[in-house]
């Protein structure tokens, strides 16, 4: 019988970042891997055409290895730096990734936010964007958005995380007033509530203020009241979250938080998914 390959968290370590930033990203990933009982794969990203293990990365790897019960290895796969994000997902798949984690900096927020969004639309691997300095905390609360742009939502990723961490799900609902399209939000919300009730996950609901920018209100609410914001990315669609530049918002302290982008019609990739 062929032994089943254990799933991993594929973590991009930018060698251009400071050693402190590298260690922060790797410790977030290592602690998440421990909670989810996944292996940890570190990919050292260099802007040079040849892979360059710069000073500090070796210490970062050793730090990850100190996290008990987590198997760590460094990916030897080569990614074309000129086609980085497209290659990234295909390499992560080869490394049996259940998640991708990337640290993102203020100077690259706008570009990376849009580019990663586009790459996630083509991938089955959820991608966690980690702003500068964000430390790992167990996901006691997870926020998801229900709005007109997300008419179909696959909740198995959120459900698995919530079951693992015993999380409360915050459902943040777009307020479109008494519109003829209100039924679309109502239907989506009904499916989500039925699913969470069926798997015994607690949830609360918060309706956005109609007079506020929905994306900013969502990010501010999530940063204050949860440990992870999950945004579903519909294939082939550039929606309101992207138009409002979620990457730029993550660089502002009151909005900064880990954000998971996951494909709307994705299949489960974690152990235990059906």
Image (cartoon, helix red, strand yellow):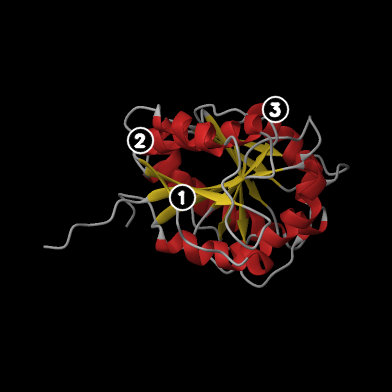
Which residue reaches farthest bottom?
Answer: 236
Q: In which quarter of the image is residue 66?
A: top left
Placement of 168 over or under 114, stated as above or below: above
In depth, the one of 264 and 194 nearer the eye is: 264
Residue 265 makes an appearance in the image: no
Q: Nearer the viewer, residue 160 or 43?
A: 43
Q: In this view, does 50 lie to the left or right of 274?
A: right
Whole-angstrom CA distance, mark 1 to mark 2, is: 21 Å
Instruction: First in sequence, mark 1 or 2: give its number.
Output: 2
Q: Position of residue 158 (x, y in %)?
A: 48, 46
In what element is the residue under mark 1?
Answer: helix
- The residue beneath circle 3 is 224
Q: Is residue 218 left or right of residue 26?
A: right
Q: How crowded is mark 3: few (under 14 residues within 10 Å), some or many (20 or more)?
A: few
Label 2: element kind: loop
In the rendering, at what x and y percent does residue 45 appear?
Answer: 60, 52
Front: mark 1 or 2: 2
Res. 243 image quadrant: bottom right
- State the mark number for residue 70: 2
Q: In this view, does 31 lie to the left or right of 107?
A: left
């Amino acid at each position: 019988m062929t032994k089943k390959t254990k799933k991993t968290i594929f973590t991009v370590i930018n060698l251009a970042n400071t050693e402190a930033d590298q260690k922060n990203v790797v410790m977030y990933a290592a602690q998440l891997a421990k909670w989810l009982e996944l292996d940890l794969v570190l990919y050292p990203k260099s802007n040079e055409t040849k892979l360059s293990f710069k000073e500090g990365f070796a210490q970062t790897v050793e730090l990850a290895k100190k996290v008990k019960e987590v198997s760590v290895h460094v990916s030897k796969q080569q990614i074309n730096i000129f086609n980085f994000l497209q290659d990234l997902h295909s390499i992560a798949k080869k490394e049996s990734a259940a998640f991708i984690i990337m640290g993102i900096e203020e100077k690259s927020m706008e570009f990376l936010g849009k580019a990663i969004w586009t790459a996630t639309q083509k991938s089955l691997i959820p991608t966690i964007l980690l702003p500068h300095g964000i430390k790992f905390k167990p996901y006691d609360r997870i926020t998801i958005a229900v709005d007109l742009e997300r008419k179909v939502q696959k909740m198995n990723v959120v459900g698995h995380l919530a079951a693992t961490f015993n999380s409360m799900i915050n459902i943040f609902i777009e307020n479109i007033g008494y519109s003829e399209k209100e039924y679309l939000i109502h239907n989506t919300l009904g499916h989500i509530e039925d699913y969470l009730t069926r798997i015994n996950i607690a949830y609360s609901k918060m309706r956005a203020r109609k007079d506020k920018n929905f994306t900013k209100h969502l990010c501010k609410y999530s940063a204050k009241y949860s440990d992870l914001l999950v945004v579903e990315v519909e294939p082939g669609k550039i929606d309101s979250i992207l138009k409002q530049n979620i990457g730029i918002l993550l660089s502002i302290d009151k909005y900064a938080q880990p954000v998971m982008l996951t494909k709307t019609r994705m299949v489960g990739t974690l152990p235990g998914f059906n």
